[in-house]
Amino acid sequence: MLTSLQNPLVKEVRKLHQSKFRKQQQQFLLEGTHLIQEALAADYPMLVACHTEGWAQRYPDLARLLTQRVERVEPVSEVVMQSLATTVHPDGIVAVAPQRLTHQPTNRIGLGLLLDSLQDPGNLGTIIRTAVAANVDGLWLTSTSVAPDHPKVLRASAGQWFRLPMVVADNLGELLQTWPQQGVQLVATRPNARLDYWAVDFTRPTVFLLGNEGAGLSANLEHHATVAVSIPMHNGVESLNVAVSAALLLYEANRQRRASS
C-alpha cells in the first residue's frame, strides 16, 4: 500500500491536477467509481488506478476487473487518496488515462455542435451529457475553450464523455467553409434574429454554433453561420445559460426528426 505523499507515483499523479502537466504528459485523471465504470464500459484505456482498501471492499468485482484491464493498480492510504483527488470527498478511486481525442467525428454530419471559447467546465460537461442523449455525431471546440479533460468537465458529463467524438481545433475556418458545401447548415443564435429556433428545418444536416458564456459567438465564427435563430425570452431576461440553449436546440432538432420519420 502506498502511504507516503512523497512516493514518485503519487507525486506524478498529483501533477495532473494542473492543466499544463496534463498537456505535457498527454494524460488526465478519472475520479470516482461511476467514471471508472463508464471508462471500462467504453473500453477506454487506463494506465494507473489507485484505490483505498475500503473502496476495494465495497466494489470487489470492480477491483478485480481493474487488475485485468489496467496496467498498474495500487492500493493507497486514505491520506494519499485525499491528495490524489481533486474532489473534497473522494469515494476511494482515482485513475490516470491517456488523452485520446483522436476519435474524430464522422465526416458525414447529421447533427453537431461547435463551441467557441466556452470557459465553464460545468457547462461543457453538461453539454457533452446532453449531446450524447440527443444523439449528436460530434463536438468541436476552439482551442480557447476550457480543456475537455478538466476534472469538472468529466464529472459534469456523468460518464458520457467517453461516448462523444470530440475535436479541439486551432483553426476551424476550413471546416466551416467545407460544411455548407456539403449541405450542412450552420446555425447561430442571435437575440434579434428574425426566426424563432423552432421555425427552422433541423431535419437537414445541422451544426449549432454556440459561444462564450459572456461574450457569445466570436465575430469570425458568426460570419460563417448560414442561419440565425433566436430563443424567445420574457422581457428583462438577456440570455440563457449556454448549456440550456444547447439542450433546447438539440431537442428541437430531435423532435423534428422524430416527427418526420
Image (tube, rainbow, N blue to C red):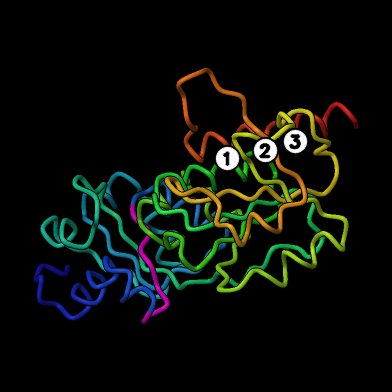
Please provide percent x and percent y for residue 147. 43, 63
Q: Is residue 239 left or right of residue 180?
A: left
Quarter of the image for residue 139 reads bottom right
Amino acid on which disc 1 is placed: Thr
Amino acid on which disc 3 is placed: Ala
Task: Tell which circle, 2 or 1, labels the residue nearer the N-terminal end.
Answer: 1
Indicate the secondary structure of the residue bearing disc 3: helix
On screen, 41 above or below 135?
A: below
What residue is disc 2 on?
250
For the point 60% across and 53% down, the residue is 163
What residue is disc 1 on?
130
Which span is picked out in magenta?
24-31
Looking at the image, is mark 2 or mark 1 nearer the viewer? 2
**Dots 2, 1 in contact, CB < 8 A:** yes
What residue is disc 3 on?
253
Q: Is residue 260 left or right of residue 194?
A: right
Question: Would residue 116 be counted in the magenta stretch?
Answer: no
Quarter of the image for residue 132 reads top right
Indicate the secondary structure of the residue bearing disc 2: helix
Indicate the secondary structure of the residue bearing disc 1: helix
Task: Tell which circle, 1 or 3, labels the residue nearer the N-terminal end.
Answer: 1
Question: Would residue 27 be counted in the magenta stretch?
Answer: yes
Determine the CA span between mark 1 and mark 3.
13 Å
**Dots 2, 3 in contact, CB < 8 A:** yes
Determine the CA span between mark 2 and mark 1.
8 Å
Determine the CA span between mark 2 and mark 3.
5 Å
For the point 46% across and 24% down, the residue is 237
